[in-house]
Amino acid sequence: MVWANTVPLLFQNQVARYGNRVALRKKGLGRWKEISWREYGQRVREVAAGLVALGLRRGECVSIIAENRPEWLYSDLGIMAAGGVTVGIYTTSSPEQCAYILSHSEARFHIVEDEEQLDKVLRVRDRLPLLERIIVIDLKGLRKFQDPMVISFEQLLSGGREYDAARPSWFRQSLEEGKPEDVAIFVYTSGTTGPPKGAMLSHETILFSTTLLERIGSIRETDETISYLPLAHIAQRLLSTFGQIRYGYIVNFAESLDTFPYDLREVSPQIFFGPPRIWEKFYSAITLRMEKATWLKRRVYRAAVAIGNRAAKRRLRGEAVPSSLRLADLLARLAIFWKLKQHLGLDRARYVLSGAAPISPGLLEFFQSIGIPIKESYGQTENCGPATAHLGDRIKLGTVGQAIPGCEVKIAEDGEILLRGRNVFQGYFKDPQATIEALRDGWLYTGDVGELDSEQFLTLTDRKKDLIITAGGKNIAPQPIENQLKASPYVADAVVIGDRRKYLTALIVIDEETVANFAQEQRIPFTTFSDLSRKREVYTLISDEVDLVNNTLSQAEKIKKFSVLDKKLDPEDGDVTPTMKVKRKAISERHRDLIESMYE
């Protein structure tokens, strides 16, 4: 085997190694279809050849906008194998957002999933003079559609097979021409304060980042994971594509987001990554399930959680668990928590991570109590994913772990978190000023604020630009307060307001499922989400949850007033990024009158 110093070379080595072993599974029409490493490798080669046949030149960008599916991976690796650069676009992006990324990246070829995504680019193609071909994966509803710019994914593969047959040595030559320092992918940042920036990540950066995964915990080639978060996000890409290539485990693709809970139960993966929103939803699902249980089952469940909590706290502190408590904890896990974990689809979960945003320590403590060993990790697009994590059994709640071996972390004088390592990006495409601001003296300036304790565990406070300075001069980080509010099963989103104000307020979005269940139990009639959000009883319910959080906060941090929004935060409305990060300025402007009413 050739020494793998680029992503495509590593992939080809693994194709040769694993051959007919299962690499991917995709669910469709209720059945799982298996895809071997050999077939995976063949499709990647066909995509690469097809793009070269269309005229792709080394270093040029090809964009992809599609839900998680094998064709995303075929395209991603095929683009790189041809010497190109992959640009992922979130499926929730508007036509204008798509136009910006396609124009900025100078993409000549654009791979779309279906009619919906095709329609977006057709609406803006008059603004994209460099765009030459649009390649459609799923042709349902497009059988009679004809456009000289549009071809099917199958046509791309067919053209690749023809090109490959005529030039059998080109593929190996293309792989050998690749260099570790070549840019492999652009990942466009979420853009909470402006247009997204294209972070350039090289093959060397990506390959180094994959080695960091096993320093967090053990990964086996017999493991499985499920791919469900957007592949345009670096965390899911690292686990679904690059990490899988490195370690050889199986990646499963759910049938759809609607069937994801059922598909997760069927797969029951050993490796699972979820942002705080997912863990909040799991907690809400457990809470809802127990609220519907009998009085006796609820009593038993609460007793089991109390036992699990006592045992978990001792383990987290590194203390021995007394034999009587250890036995009670074992019985609780077997009798209660095992079924709960099966219901979630996490009964086999061993390598479990939370990341992409801070999570409530109370939520982590709960999952530790029921036997789901979540580790928190921290990193950014600009350092290709992880930089710190809870390593091995060293879990300290309220922190995002320690620097992963091979990475360095330090705190600047103003509290900003700085990162250094071979996983740091090359800079922003066509934005030298932003690159200079982010990369200084070999350090990545993250824009996050945090602290390192005596054991070098990192506590993430907030985004530097998000810090609230009240009229009284108090510096307050809104994210920890928001996370405490979102730990409630009745709260889906919370945005704390208060910069240059005399006290803090909050905009709250209810959790539709749990609040609807509450309304049904209380015989409160409602029709829509908007109607439910306006109910007086719902306001009282949320007020009680706010009071619980306020009891844990200092006087300056307390939420004095709040409003329940009658619409969910939506990326298409500009309230949040595609990764659901809050755009505070946009929300403040959209709800200006409502906010002002809380300060009258």
Image (tube, rainbow, N blue to C red):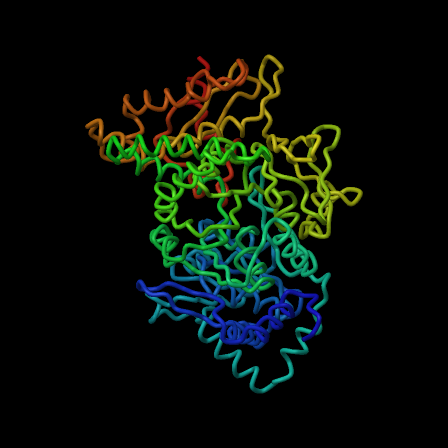
Which quarter of the rendering shows the C terminus?
Answer: top left
x and y, in percent, of residue 265 in the image: 37, 53
Farthest-out residue, front: 323
Q: Quadrant of residue 356?
A: top right
As drawn, is 160 to the left or to the right of 567?
Answer: right
Farthest-out residue, bottom: 166
Which quarter of the rendering shows the N terminus?
Answer: bottom right
Judging depth in this view, the residue of 334 and 210 nearest the camera is 334
Q: Is residue 436 above or below residue 29?
A: above
Number of numbered discs on residues = 0
Judging depth in this view, the residue of 544 and 504 nearest the camera is 544
x and y, in percent, of residue 110 in the image: 52, 63
Inspect this view and state whether residue 569 appears: yes
Residue occupying the point 57% across, 69% down: 78
As drawn, is 173 to the left or to the right of 367?
Answer: right
x and y, in percent, of residue 203 in the image: 67, 61
Residue occupying the point 62% across, 32% down: 459
Q: Quadrant of residue 439?
A: top right
Judging depth in this view, the residue of 191 and 122 nearest the camera is 191
